[in-house]
Amino acid sequence: MKGRVSWRVRHVWERNFRVFVRTWKVSFLPPIFDSLFFLVALGYGLGQFVQAIDGVEYARFVAPAIVAIGIMNASYYETTYGSFVRMYYQKTFDALIATPVTIEEVIVGEILWGATKAVVYTALILPLLALFGVISLPGSLILLGLALLGGLLFGAIGLCFTAWTPSIDTLSYPQFLFITPMMVISGTFFPIESLPMPIQYVAFALMPLAHLVSLSRALTLPAPAQMGLFSLLWLVVVTVVVVLIAVRQMRRRLVV
Amino acid sequence: MPAPVIVAEGLLKRFGDLVAVDGCSFVVNEGEVFGFLGPNGAGKTSTMRMISCVSPKSGGRLEVFGLDVERHPREIKALIGVVSQENNLDPDLSVFENLVVFARFFEIDRTEAARRAEELIDFFGLREKRDTAIEFLSGGMKRRLTIARALINRPRLVILDEPTTGLDPQARSLIWERLRELRGRGSTVLLSTHYLEEAERFCDRLVIMDRGKVLVDGRPDEIVSSYMGRSVVETVDTPDVIAFLEREEIGFERFGDLVHITIDSAEPLVHRLVEDCNPERLFVRSATLEDVFLRLTGRGLKD
């Protein structure tokens, strides 16, 4: 990748940003509503039947996971459906690589944009959750940093699927085979410790969301956080690896 | 003699087992309008994509502005403007925004980008559509904007893949006018087209390609006179006419119920044809590039 990725990635980012600003009214609503539904349905609806977990009220237990899911969805959907539309239907990438921008810069720019969306959404969700009193400000602002890391990872994961998918329809496969199961067993809505050990191992070995949730809790809840450091390390290493895979796979698809 | 803008030698492009470009050699000189002609699947687009540094070559030598395409893609891409066959304008942005956003990819600063965008909007007659979203533009306007966008970096070489395909005569003529104007300012223009009449009129030099190979290379008028002779005599396909032509050992081609004879001076032949066979239909016209094209690439459908 040497010499192929320069500061010019900012132009790719800037292009997406410009479009985002043009359509901000539509773009801002989904994360707000998603999080709101989760909070009301789980935190308050289900929460009434659930006792405190490790001394934490259920709504407060779920809140960091809602943020983590928001981070995942914002970046993952941006670099799957969003990037696929740009690549396949709008031919935006073709136009870009006819300029001094390299294909590697396009890919990295897309991942960075996915991460940016995760940060923007987190910035929208946090005050909302604070309003309901399930998360505390300004302490939880540290989750913006988590959004950047998680956004890079899920942005890169999304691009891997975009590089692989033959059509926009087949993008639903990674969604129901990977994203949805992960959303349920990553310790999001109940403590991961209540799952059988083998599943816990699988979750922590393979599921980025499990680490994102674990780190999100470690950063916001007073409970002791031995897992936090491990999760941080796992996320950093896996992010680097997946970004490299995404660049490689997209190159394969686009450079013919 | 200035250095050539493009030098290709034994250029090769493979897609798996398919050889799309099979050892092409050609030179494009500075300030020329250079045409790539050929049926679908001839390898025109593949060749242009390699020149644009977006598709890696499989073999041979290819230099643009004296720079190797593999080693200096960024430098080359900064000097060229590319108009691809497919519309790849940004549908989320307006006409003006499409131009300025694109300028940023060339590291052109914002004020300069805006200045050039306004200039190009006028040059391509898009003033009234400046703030219109792309989806509301007609096909001709979209093509004009795509060409305008390719000029935002003031390229020394403009590469256009079928710039006039699917447009009405007015839009086509405006595009040709602008391309000639660019040439007048010293830019080199490289394009592919299916409109042979346009190529004959507007290209300084051209190549005809088929199945990945360059079949001819030269000025349109020279190509026509060297391959065809100056005139084409067209008459009906009757046993009399065929017998006469075979007896006289004059070469001919049959198309449906017609016979074509290409020849340098048509008059003596016409006289004798009328005397000997008195065909019910006889027509003499100048040979065109289309005659050469069909003779070289065959009449069968290509895809």
Image: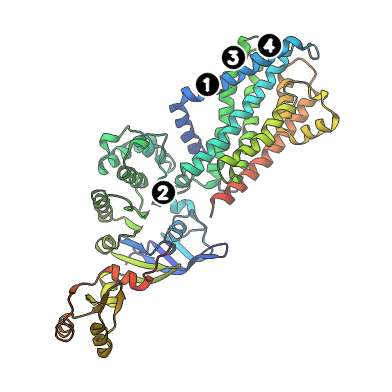
Residue A7 visible, this angle: no
Circle 1 crowding by C-alpha within 10 Å: few under 14, some 14–19, many from 20 = few
Q: Which residue is mark 4?
A: A44
A20 relative position to B135: left or right: right
**Label number found at residue B86:** 2
Secondary structure beneath dot 1 equals: helix
A178 relative position to B74: left or right: right
Q: Disc 2: which chain?
A: B
Which of A105/B68 is in front?
A105
Residue B45 percent location from the top left of the image: 43, 58
Q: Marks 1 and 3: CB-CB under 8 Å?
A: no
Work out whether mark 1 precedes mark 3 in sequence or the reverse, and give the earlier one.
1
Q: Which residue is mark 3?
A: A127
**Label number found at residue A29:** 1
Work out whether mark 3 precedes mark 4 in sequence or the reverse, and give the earlier one.
4
State the separation of the CA atoms marked 3 and 4: 18 Å
Circle 2 crowding by C-alpha within 10 Å: few under 14, some 14–19, many from 20 = some
Q: Disc 1: which chain?
A: A
